[in-house]
């Protein structure tokens, strides 16, 4: 590692993509900087000043490299949360080991924040780790969900009517709500309309669109359409 190496690395890092670093990059930089300091201690005055200038410039370049990489790593951790939910994995080979540790810590914090937001929107029961989501998708293909939806008519006949979680919906705008069939029990949670909902498997209920959309993505509910004139329920 030398002065020119740091300059080249900074040039690469100023591009949008996270540049690849050697695993021992930071150790090499420290050895280089320590070497400059040692030389400065014993060098003649003129040479010592040149070494001091080189040391200051090298430290500034290292600081800038670190700032750029930290910003990219944090952004990568945030964006990878959505990628993980979709089952996409990214190559982390561009990072030095110490940076990968930082990435993992940031990713854990972002996951927690993501879960906290979900908890506010849809309650505890639908909080699922990205690994659980991928596992569930492998074990329960969409076709299986479709097969179960074929029984919606029978379920509605048994319950006789679509359950309204709150009588207040009668006076609300139904375009803000979606009729769904519940595939899994869901403990009580606060909906987007500030009402509390407790869902049981095979219930057919009306939920705020925001909650219904999130629960559909989690395969906790499936949307249904009620044909009121004939009393039919179809997908």
Image (tube, rainbow, N blue to C red):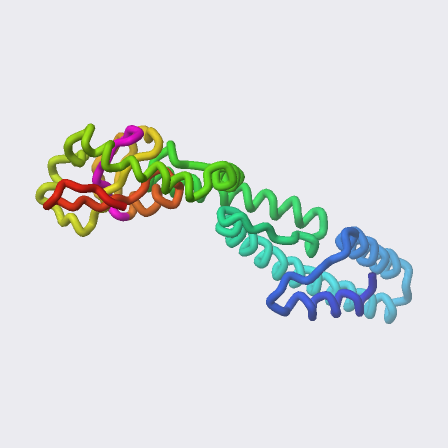
- The spot of residue 18 in percent (x, y) is 64, 61
**Would you say 138 lies left or right of 173 here?**
right
The segment highlighted magenta reads 199-209
- The spot of residue 142 in percent (x, y) is 42, 44
**Which residue occupies 28% across, 37% down?**
181
- For the residue pair 219 and 84, the one nearer the viewer reads as 219
Magenta-span inclusion, residue 147: no
Q: In which quarter of the image is the N terminus?
A: bottom right
Q: How many labels does the image show?
A: 0
- For the residue pair 202 and 232, the one nearer the viewer reads as 232
**Would you say 132 lies left or right of 11 here?**
left
Magenta-span inclusion, residue 208: yes
**Which residue occupies 33% across, 31% down?**
186
- For the residue pair 13 and 228, the one nearer the viewer reads as 228
Instruction: Give residue 118's quadrant in the image.
Output: top left
- The spot of residue 165 in percent (x, y) is 19, 34
- The spot of residue 71 in percent (x, y) is 57, 58
Instruction: Give residue 114's quadrant in the image.
Output: top left
Instruction: Give residue 154's quadrant in the image.
Output: top left
**Which residue occupies 32% across, 47% down?**
213
**Would you say 129 lies left or right of 22 here?**
left
């Amino acid at each position: 590692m030398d002065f020119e190496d740091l300059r080249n690395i900074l040039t690469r890092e100023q591009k949008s993509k996270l540049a690849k670093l050697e695993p021992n990059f930071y150790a090499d930089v420290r050895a280089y900087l320590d070497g400059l300091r040692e030389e400065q201690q014993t060098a003649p005055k003129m040479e010592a000043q040149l070494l001091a200038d080189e040391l200051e410039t090298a430290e500034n370049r290292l600081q800038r490299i670190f700032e750029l990489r930290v910003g990219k790593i944090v952004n990568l951790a945030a964006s990878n949360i959505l990628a993980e939910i979709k089952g996409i994995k990214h190559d982390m080979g561009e990072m030095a080991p110490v940076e990968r540790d930082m990435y993992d810590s940031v990713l854990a914090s972002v996951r927690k924040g993501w879960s906290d937001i979900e908890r506010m929107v849809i309650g505890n029961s639908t909080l699922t780790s990205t690994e659980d989501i991928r596992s569930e998708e492998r074990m329960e293909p969409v076709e299986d969900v479709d097969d179960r939806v074929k029984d919606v008519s029978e379920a509605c006949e048994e319950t006789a009517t679509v359950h309204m979680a709150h009588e207040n919906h009668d006076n609300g705008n139904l375009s803000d709500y979606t009729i769904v069939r519940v595939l899994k029990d869901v403990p009580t949670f606060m909906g987007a309309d500030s009402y509390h909902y407790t869902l049981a498997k095979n219930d057919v209920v009306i939920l705020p669109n925001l909650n219904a959309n999130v629960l559909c993505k989690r395969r906790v509910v499936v949307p249904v359409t009620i044909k009121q004139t004939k009393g039919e329920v179809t997908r």
